[in-house]
Structure formats: C-alpha cells, structure tokens
Image (cartoon, rainbow, N blue to C red):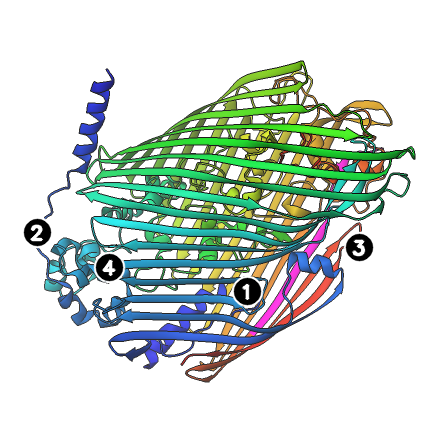
Amino acid sequence: MNMTSRTLALIAAASAVVSAQPPAAPTPESVGPLRGDEVRGYNVTNSVELGYRLHGVNGNEAGYRSDVNYGNGLRLLGSSLTINSKEGHGKLFDEVLLNTQGLGNDPYQSATFRIRHNRWYRYDLSWRISRYVNPGLTLEPGAHSLNTSRMWQDHDLTLLPESRFQFLMGYSRNSQEGAGLYTQNLFDQHRGDEFPLFANIHRRQREFRLGGQLQYRKLKLILLRGWQRYLEDTPLSLSNGSGLNAADNTTLSRFSTANAYSGDTPFWRAHLLAESGRWLAIGARFTYAGTRRGFAIDESAIGASRLGSAVNRQFFAGGSGTRPVTTANFTISLFPVESVTLTNHTAFHQVRMEGNATLTQVQNGFGGAAIVDFRYLGIRSFINATDALFRPARWLGLRAGYQVSDRRIRSVEAETIGAFNERLPNEQTNRVHSGLFGIRLQPAKPLTFNFDLELGRANRPFLTLSERNYHAFGARGQYKRGSLLLSAAVRTNYNTNSVSLFSHSSRSRNYALDASWSARRGIAFDAGFGKQHLDTLTGIAYFASGDLAAAQSSLYVSNIHSGHATVRFALASRADLCLGYTRVQDTGDGRAQQAAGTGAFPGVQVLPLTFDSPQARVSFRLHPRLRLNFGYQYYRYAEEFSSLRGYRAHTGFTSMLWSF
Amino acid sequence: MRTIFLGGLLLLTLSAAQSPSPSSGGYVGSNTCKTCHAPVWANFYKNPHYRTLATGAEPPEKTGCESCHGPAKAHVEARGGKTTIPRAFSLMPASQSLDTCLACHEQSIGRAQIRRSSHTQADVACNSCHSIHKPVSARSLLAKQQSNLCYGCHNSVRAQFSMPHKHRVNEGAMQCTDCHNPHGSAAPVWRSGLRPRMVEAAADGEQPCLRCHADKRGPFAFEHAPLRVEGCETCHAPHGSVNSRMLKRPAVFTLCLECHNGATGFGLSGGGIPTQTSSHNMNDPRYRNCTTCHVRIHGSNSDPRFLR
C-alpha cells in the first residue's frame, strides 16, 4: 500500500470512527490490506476480532443488567468477510458478505449474511439475539420482572434477481424465551391480595412467504402470499402462602393453571409500481391479513380470603379472537415542470377485532353460570395527504401540504349470563385537518437552513392525551465544509386538548447543537449538546379513602440535558486512541428535594437523575494484519432522591483484531 | 361510471409505463473512464452497480460509470474537470441527484413514498447518506455506520438512545431502519395528529413495534383500545426514556390516571374513560402500581379488566 492510499485509509477510518459512540467493542479500526487478497478469481477481505470482556459493578447490579448487561468472558467481538468475483461472472456466486457481532455470550449478538449470483439467485440472512433483564424497577411496589432472550431471524431468497420475472421466498422466526415474574390478584378483584406468578416464557412466531415479481417496461407488480403461525405456551405457577401485602390475611394453599394461546395469520400483499421519469410516478399497495387466535385457560385456587374464610375457586375461560386487516395505499406524484413536485397520497386501513370468551367461575360451589363476553373493536381510517414542493432557485425551496384524515371507531361490548343479555354498541368519528409549511434556504453552498411548521385541528380525539389543537415547529441550520460540520436544531410540539371543564396541555421543546471535524493527520472530533424539555398538565380524578378527588391535576416536568464528546488520534500509523464521554441528566423542575407527600398525588412528578459514561479505547497496529486493542467504559447511574437503584460499573475488553 | 373510472386509471398507468426514449450520443464506455480514475475503478467490481457492466446487456446510458454520471465524451475531450461531467453529484442540486438515482431505483416497495418523504422535502438526497465509491458497508452502500448517519442530523435522537432505558441501537442489536424507512413511508394509521412520515408500518399497516413484540399483537378477546387507536407511544417513548420500561412517566399510576379521569367526550362511548372504583384507595401505596393487578394491560383473553 502506498503512502497516499494509507493516508486515505486512515482518514476514512478516522471519520467513520469518531462519530461513533458505541459500547467499547467491537473495534472499528481496519486491519489487513485495504483492497483484500486475490484467491482463484475472487477478491477476499476478512477480519476477526477475538477478545475477552470483563466488568465489575458497585451498587444495584440488577440496574446495571437492565441498562447495560455486558458480562465477563471470551467473545468473538466482531468479524467481517467479503468475497467478490473479479468480473461479475463467478461460477457459483459473485458476492458473499458476512458480518457478525458479539458472538459467544454477549447480550447483543447479530449476524448478517448474503450470498449472491448476479444472474441466478440472492440469499439474505439476518440473525439477532437480544438478552434483556428487567428487574422490576418501577418506583412504586411492583414485582414484574423479566429475564428473557429474544431471537429474530429472517431468510430471503430471490431467484433470477436480474430478470423481469423474479421468484421470492422467505422465512422469519421471532421467539422469546426465559423467565418472568408477574403477579395475580386472587379471591377478590378489588381487595384481594396479589401473589407472585412465575412464568416460563415460550413465545414463537414463524412466517413463510412465497411470491413473485413481474416487470413490464416501467410497470412492476409484486405479489406475495404468506402464512404466520403464533404459539404461546407459557407454563405459570404460583407459590403457596401469603401474598405481597403483609397487612392482608389472604392466603393460598394450592394453585394450578394451564393456558394455551395460538393461531394463524394468512395474508396477501400486492404492490403495483409504475413511473415515467418525465412527469408521473404511481405506487399502489394492497394487503389483506386474516388472523385467528384460539385460547383456553383452566385455573384452580384454594386458600383463605382476607376475612379468613375458606375459598375454593375454579375458573375456566375459552374462546377465540379474530382480526381481519385490510390496508390500501395509493400514491401519485406529478412533475409538471422541473422545479415542482406534487404528490398525493391516500391511505385506507380497516381492522376489526372480535373476540368472545366463555367464562365460568365456581367459588365454593356457587356462581357456576357461564358468562359469554363479547367485544368488538373496529377502526376504519382514511387519510389523504397532498404535498407540493417548489424549488424556484437552487438556494430556495418551498413546500406546503394539507392532510385530512377521517377515523371511525366502532365498539360493541356484550355480555350474556343465562337469560340476561346486555349489548352496548358505540360509534364515533374523528376528523383531523392539518397543514404543513416549510422553507429551505441555502444562502451559500455549505450553509443550509430548514424551517417547517405543522398546524392541526381534531374534532373528536379519542384520548385525553391525543392531539386536538396542536402545532409543531422545527428549524435546523447546518454548515458543512469539508470534514467540518456544525449544526443547530430546535423542535417544539405544543398540544392543547381541553374541553368544557377538563384541561390537558403538553409542551415539548428540543434544542440541539452539534459539531464534528476530522483533520487530515488523523485527528477527529465530535461533540454535541441537547436539551429536551417536556411539561404536561392533565386533569385527573381518583379515589382516596373513599372520596373522589376530581379537581386535581397531574403536572409532569422533565428537563433532560444531554451531551457527548469524542476525540480520536491516530499516532504515526501505529496506534489509535479514542476518548469519549456521554452524559444524560434529567433535572426535573429544578427542585433539590422530593415533594412532600400530599395524599396520593404529589403536585409535581419528577425523576431527577444522571446517567453518564466515559470511555477510552486504544488500538495498536502490531503488523499490517494484526491489531491489539484495549477498551474501557464506565457507567454511572444516580437518582437524586433515592440511592436504591444507583450503580457504578466498570467494563472493559482486550482483543486481537486479525486479518488472514 | 365504474368502467370509465377503471379504464381511465388503466390508461393513466399504461401511459406512465411508457419508457422515455434514451438519448444515445456521447457515451465512451467505462474502459475510457478507468484510464484516469484508476483508484475508483480498482474496487468498482465490488460495487452492486458493477452488475450493469457484468451483464453486458444494458444500453450505454445504463452501463457503468456513465449510467450515473452521463455521457463522458465532453469530459474526455476537455481532459477532465468536474464541470464537464454531465452529472457530477458534488455539483448537482439535491433534486437532480434524487432524479438521477430514481431513474433506476424508483420502482421499489421501500421507495414508493420517496417523493413525499421528509428527507426529500428537506433536500436530503441519496448521496447525503449513501456513498457509491467509498461506502463503509457493502450492503446499501452507506457512507457511515447507520446509526451515526442518522445521528448526524437527528441529534436529539442520539440523546434518547443514550438514556438508561432504551432500545439497543448503540449496542448494535437494532438499527434505525428496523422501525423507520429513510426513503419515506405511507401515512401511519394508528394515530391522528402529528403523524410521523418516516415510520415504516408493519406489513398489515400496523405499528412497527408489533413486528418484534408479537405477544402484544393479539387479537385479544378484550383489547385495550388505546393501543390500537393511538399506538404504543401513548404510554411508551420508543427511542429511550429515563423511566423504567421506557414509559413516559416515572410512576405507572400517573400514566393511567391521566386518561382514566372520566372527562366527557373521550373514550369508546364518548362518556369519558372510566375512573377507578371507590375501592381503590390511592392513599394506600398498593393501589398505585396499577399493573400489579391489571397484569395483561396490553390485552387479555379472560378478563375485561385485564386482571389475568
């Protein structure tokens, strides 16, 4: 490699690395010959990073596992392989790409693989695992925790990828396995006790896809038929004894439950795309999916109620749920003159969720009548959006848009107990009109400004928190010259959803400043600061000691200050040093002490805390094909008003990055 | 009437399907380009665009360097110079860059909404994120690692993913494109105001969250309606939050009570979303964690109050 190429490679690596703020592995520095090795008509580049992770935690280790979760041990921190045929005429394949991260035992592992023959086939694989721990960190008493592993994999095979007729096949799998701890209320739904419920979680969803693509001139039709299968068979078990509330006398002496939940979703998807680069483009999509799920629950509990009387309860529920979904989109873009783009987009969505459950509960030999509960929730949405983009000059762009959406919600709640039959149908429609305005200015080539404003009005919002009378404003300025990038942005969202005697208002304001720069001699710098403010005032109502408190408000205030800085040095082509720091701090409303308890609802809800993480990484080039790396990252989580969840964690790794 | 409408639509579609007649002059072939641009050429066979050369079946205006940069005759005759390249991307306005790439790449499901996407409207063109000749990822030819590309403009999102409770994007377990389509998406149908333009719905038009969180998808015999009507963002901050479970409030009961306040005009019946019953004494801390009893808050098959 000559000097110029080496310098270019270093600069490219520097610019790629400095903006990253990942946990301290895998190492992003490149190793091996930039252009790879020639092997039997193929070009091969590869690298493997093998290392050892270590960590130590002071404080709440469960908090660390929830937020960070890196452990100790040997890992294949990262690997990369590319194989390309030299002239695009490989015998068996023309391209192979393989990338992995965290294999071994990292909580976040992934692999992507592609093998492609230009003429005959293309196969893509994506595989991921994420291990997540939730130790039940809600502030108020709660015993829900989770320690599960999610795995996703997607396989897609395209036959004849360069042809006008392509065949598509796919398979996806999504599973969640592990332990969960929930709670179950027993013997009195309002005042019974809660018992910890252990769950051995097994959830699996599989999807098969089969389809084709047909192209005729500028017209393309894609048709896909698929089948989804969902299965949840999570064994549950309860411990005997007293419940979570020490003051409650409810006890459980025997409990057993069995449940099953599974179903299928066959679906059709069709896409039609047509274009004429001169004046028109059309895209249309239609999908239909019909979902059916069946379920059954059989539960038996024996114990004593809070009043001390014996309780023997059997519960059975069985039924099904269905959800047919129809979605259609149509987009037409017109280009009457070069400087004008007009786009109209229509979306239609209809979903119906129907479920019926036959519930039978027998308590101490009484109440055996079956209750048939039926629910229907139908949502039909129609959205039409028109956007116009006008660029009268290179330095000026104007845009405007109008969107109207109409949503109808129908619901039916029905209950049948013997001869008694009750049915409550409801219907409502919400219409939203919104306008969008924007301007883009480029007074000089490296300098751009973008401003946008959206105003909207809804006549019948569904929730008290929904948008009714809202406006959102955004502005962004950017200066970019060479590797120097300076930017500033502001975005505000204001919503008022007040009717009659009820009030709700929400205001958020985000500000951000960012700067990055890479020097030619292997020095690069990136830093940013942001502030996110949110205040929400909402009327609430609740019962306290039997009295209804209806004239109070919930005021939530959050002021999150965040910053990051990274600097990287390349030392004489032999070593790379990267130093970084990230900090997130919520100052709440600025108070120094927790609000004194005024009944159930403190006037202001705040959670002031600090989460910061400095890191350092050094990489030594021992040989053109070998690097030795060390990394260290420190995490500190601290809440202002409680030390129970705080922790300090030291994490590190050492690794060898090898190209062979 | 329907026949006339359908006939008109068919005519419109077929007229759009007519390809423009290509101009044929001034093409010199990629072999001429490599004479001077050897460093670019040396790795170009790894580029997906090399396939236009490998097939040998494409017309000159769709082959190799000139398929993107235009006929090079004038550039060669002038012995170089950026201004003599018909389509030099560093000199082109964003709209022209977009049009050039879409000449081949428009007919894709993922790019069906690109003309109305927020990126296009803000003049963020293809080469703002993709680097054809110096990509860091062979897939998608991205100029940087994906999250860093997005953070470059969306600074506040970087802060959200640095919070203690977040989706694992910085850790590499997820990517921005798992939920977003940077090329624009169809209008989301799960909320009514301030609709995001870049959130890619699941295939059935549902929220992208349900692609991974399949257990929340249902259908359930008893649905918690806000999930389906207004979406997961009613309670959760999808990028990250300082609150556990990425909730929008630090305490669960405050989140629930902001909706369950009986204010008329809201909810399924319009009579207000029901308040809690008088047996719930909020002075007693055990009643403040609603989900201790209402465990199936995303939907239940056996209890209308989501108790099991």
- Label count reads 4
Q: Please state, as top left, top right, bottom left or bottom right, where the N terminus of chain A lies in the image.
A: bottom left
Q: Earlier in the sequence, mark 4 or mark 3?
A: 4
Q: Which chain is home to disc 4?
A: A
Q: Nearer the viewer, mark 3 or mark 1?
A: 3
Residue for badge 1: A566
Q: Which chain is home to disc 1?
A: A
Q: Where is A462 relative to A162, above or below? A: above
Q: Quadrant of residue A183?
A: top right
Whether residue A345 sits left or right of residue B244 in the image: it is: left
Which residue is located at x 18 percent, y 63 percent? Answer: B54
Judge if badges 2 and 3 mark residues of a common chain. no
Discs 3, 1 touching: Cβ within 8 Å: no
Residue type, label 2 = Ser
Q: Nearer the viewer, mark 2 or mark 4?
A: 4
Residue for badge 4: A120
Query: In the image, which residues are magenta?
Result: A599-617
Residue for badge 3: A644
Residue type, label 4 = Trp
Q: Quadrant of residue B86?
A: bottom left
Q: Where is A124 relative to B198, above or below? A: below
Residue for badge 2: B24
* Secondary structure found at label 2: loop
Q: Nearer the viewer, mark 1 or mark 4?
A: 4
Q: Earlier in the sequence, mark 3 or mark 1?
A: 1
Q: Does residue B142 show up?
A: no
Q: Marks 1 and 4, how far apart in space?
A: 45 Å
* Secondary structure found at label 1: strand
Q: Please state, as top left, top right, bottom left or bottom right, where the C terminus of chain A lies in the image.
A: bottom left
* Few, some or many residues within 10 Å of mark 1 (<14, 14–19, 20+): many
* Secondary structure found at label 4: loop
- Nearest the viewer among B296 and A605 is B296
